[in-house]
Image (spheres, helix red, strand yellow):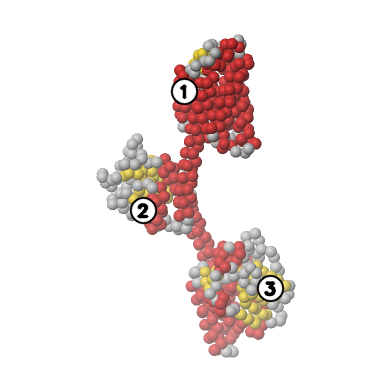
Amino acid sequence: MHTPFNWLLLLSLFQQMSVFLVIAYLFSKTPLFAPVVNVSLRLPHKVVIYFVFSAFCILGTYFGQPVFDAIANTRAVGAVLGGLFGGPVVGTLVGLTGGLHRYSLGGFTDLACAISTTAEGLLAGMVHFWFHKVRQSPKALYSPALALVVTFTAELLQMSIILLVAKPFEQALGLVNLIAAPMLFANSIGAALFMAMIRDRQSIYDKFSSTYSAKALNLASRMVGLFKPGFSTEQARKMADIILEETGVSAVAITDRENVLAFTGMGDDHHYTGEKISAQITLDAIAENRVMFADGIETPYTCSHSEDCPLGSALVIPLRSADEVIGTVKLYESKRRLFLNINHTLGEGIARILEELILVGRYQQQKQLLTESELKLVRAQINPHFLFNALNTISAVIKQDADRARELTGDLARFLRTNLKQNQDVTTLAQELELTNSYLQIEQARFAEQLQVNVNIDEKWLDYRLPSFTIQPIVENAIKHGTSQQLEAGKLSIYIEERSPFPALIIEDNAGLYQCKEPEADGTFRLSEDGLGINIVCTRLKNMFGKNARLSIECDKNESTRVIIPLTEAVC
């Protein structure tokens, strides 16, 4: 006999499903929602899924409509979703839990419902396995259409099991005729709506994450190279302008511990750069080393400058360096706008970016101080013994050739003047050769015919840039530890040779007394104290121009030593 469609039962099931969706929406606001949004096979996430959807199964039974000593319900939605999100094991356990609970309530369909609910969870779990393991497309599990089809199939399976297991058969058939269509329709639509809500939450998370990441990356890229040691007003103003553009807040301020370094945006007619910090919220953030937020609603914000200030809320984030607060970043919104959570989070991210820039700036400052110390160390190494030898040489020449002595005195003066005034990190090859020539004039006078010098540098190379005090320490090392130690005449050559991949500046002696070694991992050579100058040259070349500018040494024992400085593209 034909059974008419039970619209009242369908309406009741939809009422139950509405309660489910409200609970699911509230659930989506809790941290427990994360394992559902992201397919994960981690045990803690599976445990959460088991408990959540087992609860949905049990609630579905309790909310059900009694029909013929049975219950028309939405229990299948919990079992199916538990299996889709948790896999075969979790789905089976969720279904078994919901089934055992239904069995405990009795009725002529108790065993059939217990078996069918377990089977529904297993079926959905196998679908999870297919998409996650076989097809390698776990995101397809979040399709509302898939949830609808799986739930529809699961409900057909349940009706079949009721017909097979429940006794008497005539009563089971009557029940199925009455509840099958409403339950198939309501539960399938409900599962699809539940899945659609989860997918929407996923897209919101993804959109939020991508927006935040894009803003943070853009801020970082625009600020790279902007920060220099000193945290000046000009730097702070540029940073404030960038933050204002990227976040879209109403105003931005940057302070140190005492003064406002920059203010830009709404209210700049009465918030002034350079003034003392007067806002209590800023002073508290500095003193307590914590983020302060006045939303203008629960926590009032009051401008310390004007009663008519249009700004209504403020976020103050302390800037830290070595666990010390050195300033703040302040984001403001007007009284007509709410302070968005993304700007709250982004504001704290901006502070971390600025802290990293401060750290980089201090590193650069320390690096500059180290470079200056290296230069001073080179000078300190050069002056004492060279000056002593030079004065002895000039004293000896005076007795034989006064004019020559005056020339040597001029060479010594030029060398010392350049040595004392040379504070720049980078110089040209021409300037380096001029300094080296003043040094060699004195050494040639000292050794007479025992030292022959040949400089062969084409004019096209003279504008090449390289670290100051690069050539002279190497030349001095070649004379002191090379040519001066042999009986025959020493020969020193400075020239440029075409090599691959870069041309090379070569300082060569004919002594060949240097025992060549491979450079250390940091690019320097394991030398005695007498080799300190050449190691400093190694370090400064590498620091300034990178690994391609690495100094190397070639040796032919008792024949020659060649110190090679590649003229890389970076040195141009």
Q: Name the residue carrying label 3.
A: 561
| Number of the front mark, 2 or 3 | 2
Name the residue located 53 percent from the left edge and 23 percent from the top edge.
184
Are the residues tagged 3 and 1 within 8 Å (C-beta)? Answer: no
Q: Quadrant of residue 228?
A: bottom left
For disc 3, the neighbor class at 10 Å (few under 14, some 14 to 19, many from 20) is: many
Residue 288 shows in this picture: no
The amino acid at mark 1 is Phe
Q: Position of residue 495 (x, y in %)?
A: 62, 77
Name the residue located 64 percent from the left edge and 75 percent from the top edge.
497
| Number of the front mark, 1 or 2 | 1
Q: CA distance from mark 2 to mark 3?
A: 58 Å
Q: Tag 3's secondary structure?
A: strand
- Disc nearer the start of the sequence (1/2): 1
The residue nearer to you, when weighing 562 against 437, is 562
The residue nearer to you, when weighing 347 against 364, is 347
Q: Name the residue carrying label 2.
A: 262
**In the displayed structure image, the side of residue 319 where residue 276 appears, left or right:** left
The amino acid at mark 2 is Ala
Q: Quadrant of residue 544?
A: bottom right
The amino acid at mark 3 is Thr
Q: Name the residue carrying label 1.
A: 14
In this rendering, the answer to whether 423 lies above or below 439 is: above
Q: Position of residue 87 (x, y in %)?
A: 61, 30
In this rendering, the answer to whether 149 lies above or below 58 is: below
Q: Tag 2's secondary structure?
A: strand
